[in-house]
Amino acid sequence: MAILPILCFPDPRLHKRAQPVAQVDERVRAIVADMFETMYHAKGIGLAATQVDIHERIVVIDVSEERNQPLVLVNPELVWASPETRIGEEGCLSVPGIYDGVERALAVQVRAQDADGHSRVIEAEGLLAVCMQHEMDHLLGKVFVEYLSPLKRGRIKTKLLKQQKAEQAER
Ligand code: ZN
């Protein structure tokens, strides 16, 4: 297992569309293991493969307090979204230190394969539903700041580029 580097906004690779996984095999399970290690290390609740520069439809999630309920979504597809929405504060490992409100469906049903390749439908509401929608956006090349106003997004971009420059200078 390995901790993978996480791409940071506005890295253009975050806007690539992930390709479907043809077969859930050892190669995919190794990616999943690395993604969990990376997510837990970064103290995140979800990670899409896109964020670690792997452009395949793979997501790992754990929204539990105890960090012991790993959820693997391979080839996730939205089956249903509730018409009721809610605006909640979101953050992202690829947009460090930035939190803002995003409107999402309150509940969703998502069909996905697990780490053994078995397909099932997961019903979720609350934080898990938000997390699934956020991670599935990543697979489409979408980062949550794209829901914000162009002005806000511009400020975030400037701030993060400055941070990234400073970090590079320290190395
Ligand atoms: Zn994210």
Image: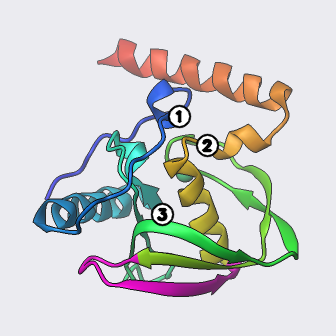
Tell me: is circle 3 under 8 Å from ligand 1.
yes
Q: Which mark is residue 58?
A: none
- Real-space Cα separation, disc 1 to disc 3, in angstroms: 18 Å
Q: Nearer the viewer, residue 93 or 105?
A: 105
* Label 1 residue SS: helix
Q: Which mark is residue 15?
A: 1
Q: Which image quarter holds the C terminus?
A: top left
| Relative image position of residue 102 (x, y in whole percent) | 78, 55
Q: Quadrant of residue 157?
A: top right
| Relative image position of residue 41 (x, y in whole percent) | 33, 58
The answer to whether residue 2 shows anywhere in this view is yes
- Residue at 30% across, 40% down: 5
Tell me: is circle 2 under 8 Å from ligand 1.
yes
Instruction: Identify residue for label 3.
Output: 46
Q: Is residue 108 shown left or right of residue 66?
A: right
Q: Is residue 106 above or below residue 52?
A: below
Q: Is residue 27 shown left or right of residue 6?
A: left
Q: Is residue 139 above or below residue 127?
A: above
Task: Bin the neighbour count of mark 1 within 10 Å (Cα to Cα): few under 14, some 14-19, many 20 and up.
Answer: some
- Residue at 56% across, 19% down: 161
| Relative image position of residue 143 (x, y in whole percent) | 61, 43
Instruction: Identify residue for label 2.
Output: 143
At label 3, which amino acid type do we have? Gly
At label 1, which amino acid type do we have? His
**Which of the two marks, 1 or 2, is nearer to us in this view?**
1
Q: What is the image's colouring?
A: rainbow
Dot 1 or dot 2: first in sequence order is 1
| Relative image position of residue 33 (x, y in whole percent) | 22, 65
Q: Mark 1–mark 2 contact, CB under 8 Å?
A: yes
